[in-house]
Amino acid sequence: MHDLTAAFSVPVRFPVRFTRHAWAPDNTVVADCMPSAPGRPARALVVVDAGLVTADPGIVDRIQAWFRLREQGPHLAAQPLVLAGGEAAKADWSTVDRVMDQAAELQLCRHSYVLALGGGALLDAVGLAAALVHRGLRLVRMPSTTLGQCDAGLGVKNAINAYQQKNFLGTFQPPWAVIDDLALLDLQDDRSWRAGISEAVKVGVIKDADFVRRIAALAPAIASRDPAAMAEVVHRCAALHLDHISTGGDPFETGSSRPLDFGHWTAHRLEILTRHRLLHGEAVAIGVAIDAAYAVRCGWLSEEDGLMIAKALTGVGLPLWDASLDLRDADGRRSILAGLEQFRAHLGGHLTLAMPDGLGRRQDIHAVDPVRLDQALSLVGRWRRPHAAGVPSH
């Protein structure tokens, strides 16, 4: 007998729709994203971030009223499930279990929808639950934060944290659709409003130099909560993320190169070191600044471009520094460096970090020089001082 080989490909296509006030009675975007079979209205479980309900107490009533108007579907399978958001949503299996319990009780099938409405952490946990039930319910994401609309709501990953590691448990399962309701961004507090901009700067540094310059120019408008400026950045950031997922050649990250994780080896470690005192977007801002400074010290990025990256971040009010960067272990080694080992394990044992190769271009490196990292941290210290006004102190 001879060996056999199976080879097949599965086309993946999902829309990212932009709208305002998705739950207005005459808005059909949600219905467009949840089509039904003829004569069989689709059923939907809606999961809402409790933080969003606090910011907009009437949202659950509007969701239910919107569904009642849909005679041909989709139909609401039960009253929307309101669950805690933030990192607590993915700190353990609790959120995943609640969603799976509800799906089982409602007897949802593989043609049913789960619509997750909230911040990136809730989307991650609900997405994991949807991926596990019947090996995949139809997940519709409606991110409610800048971070979610710029980054977390767009990818094909679903995960929760475990074993003191970010996103240790999870799946790759593309969403059925993504709906960016730009009106939801207005409900955020100032800190959350600006936090997701770090993901836009991140993707611009490695893919689009003009986008970084545009963010720097728009920074005062974003800081003053101009909706048009924010909408422009969210849309372009989404386009760049989707371009990478669609054309980068490795949407399910079977290799070691993770371009969209630029700045994240530091960010993930900072979140753990600060016990999530830092928002993910704030940690990413610090990580992007450190890696940009490292690139400057290695000659891969001009100091002028490095300073512009720093100004784009601080201009919207993001931090470049946290006191946890000064923490050291018993051997005198910077505690932040443990993030490299965690990243190495996450990547399958071979460290690969995305770095700028000139603004708007990317290269991969496989080691970090501790001496140059110290030089980079000193440079970030200089960058943050002239632009400290309005930057959160951590």
Image (cartoon, helix red, strand yellow):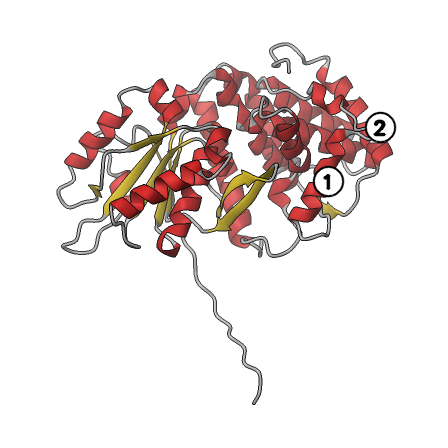
Residue 68 at x, y = what percent?
Answer: 15, 35
Label 1 CA crowd tier, 10 Å (few <14, some 14–19, many 20+): many
Q: Residue at left 58%, top 17%?
A: 317
Give the residue pinned by disc 2. Answer: 332
The amino acid marked with disc number 1 is: Leu
- Splitting the image into 4 quarters, where does residue 123 fall? top left
Q: Nearer the viewer, residue 388 or 158?
A: 158
Q: Quadrant of the C terminus?
A: top right
Callout 1: SS = helix
Question: Total of numbered circles in the picture?
Answer: 2
Label 2 CA crowd tier, 10 Å (few <14, some 14–19, many 20+): few
Residue 226 at x, y = what percent?
Answer: 45, 18
Q: Residue at left 30%, top 28%?
A: 21
Point out the tag, 1 or 2, that comes first from the N-terminus.
2
Give the residue pinned by disc 1. Answer: 340
Q: Residue at left 72%, top 33%?
A: 291
Q: Nearer the viewer, residue 316 or 42?
A: 42
Q: Residue at left 63%, top 34%?
A: 268
Q: Is residue 362 visible?
A: no
In the image, farthest residue toward the top: 389
Of circles 1 and 2, which is in front? Answer: 2
The amino acid marked with disc number 2 is: Gly
Callout 2: SS = loop
The label shown at residue 231 is none
Residue 331 at x, y = what percent?
Answer: 85, 30
